[in-house]
Amino acid sequence: MPEALATRDLMLVIRAGAPPPLPAAERARLVRRTRALAWVGIGWHVIECAVAVAAGIAASSIALIGFGIDSAIESAAGLVVVWLFASRRAGSLTAERRAQVLIAASFFALAAYVAFEAARSLVSGSEPSASWVGIGLAAVTAPTMPLLARYKTRLGRRLGSHAAISEGAQTMLCAYLSVGLLVGLGANAVLGWWWADPLCALAIAGVAVREGVLTWRGESEGCCAAC
């Protein structure tokens, strides 16, 4: 009888779309891996933020400054995941929801700032200078961030953690922003299309709003849903 009940409960979990319960040892291993990956991401994004913001200020590039701010927010989101998976909070639905709200708020904050500055740049006709440092940074980040996002999302799904999945989505947003940077900064440097920079920033702001809404609702599987 207990075995039949356990099988029934497992089938209900699977039908509900949630991952089946993990053995304690396996969950502990995945939690350690998730926290370690978050710390690696935090270290990288701190460096990325410093380089991008400095280069963005030097070139008056809103897309590059927005990229740097996104890196800072990603560092904060990584800290949220580390906090969430501290031993006392691991598996807590209250902590999970709180982490989701914090990550969603970071998406909205990024979108608001980038949209405002990009619109102001377009209206005022402020032309950013070419930034080869920014182009180089984006060229490195664009192919590496999807790999990191895929791994974070996979771990989040195995743990059944929406907050961890959302943090992976934010990492993928960083990859999209990198592509936008390559297009915007490249068009400005090579073709002199200064307006490409704020237009790319506005597109990224739109993606950030979408991800923030989905994360707030607890529906987001991020940009990595097909990974």
Image (cartoon, rainbow, N blue to C red):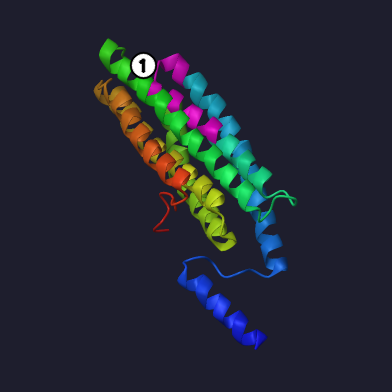
Confirm whether the magenta stretch covers residue 69: yes
- In this view of the protein, can residue 132 be seen by the observer? no
Q: Residue at x 53, y 71 (%)?
A: 13
Between residue 35 and residue 107, name the one nearer to us: 107
Main secondary structure along the magenta-highlighted residues: helix
| Above or below for 98 versus 188 | below
Confirm whether the magenta stretch covers residue 134: no
Between residue 143 and residue 216, name the one nearer to us: 216
Spot occupied by residue 181 in the image (x, y as percentages of width and height): 37, 32
Element under disc 1: loop
Q: Residue at x 47, y 32 (%)?
A: 137
- In this view of the protein, can residue 202 be seen by the observer? yes
Spot occupied by residue 201 in the image (x, y as percentages of width and height): 35, 28
**Residue span colored magenta:** 56-73
Q: Quadrant of the C terminus?
A: bottom left
Q: Residue at x 55, y 30 (%)?
A: 72
**Horizontal relation, residue 187 to residue 101: left or right:** left
- Number of numbered discs: 1
**Horizontal relation, residue 155 to residue 55: left or right:** right
Spot occupied by residue 87 in the image (x, y as percentages of width and height): 74, 52
**Residue identified by numbered label 1:** 129
Crowd rating for badge 1 (residues with CA inside 10 Å; few <14, some 14–19, many 20+): some
Q: Amino acid at mark 1?
A: Ser
| Above or below for 29 versus 83 | below
| Above or below for 144 versus 134 | below
Spot occupied by residue 165 in the image (x, y as percentages of width and height): 51, 52
Q: Quadrant of the N terminus?
A: bottom right
Q: Residue at x 45, y 23 (%)?
A: 65
Q: Residue furthest right?
A: 88
Between residue 196 and residue 82, name the one nearer to us: 82
| Above or below for 211 versus 64 | below
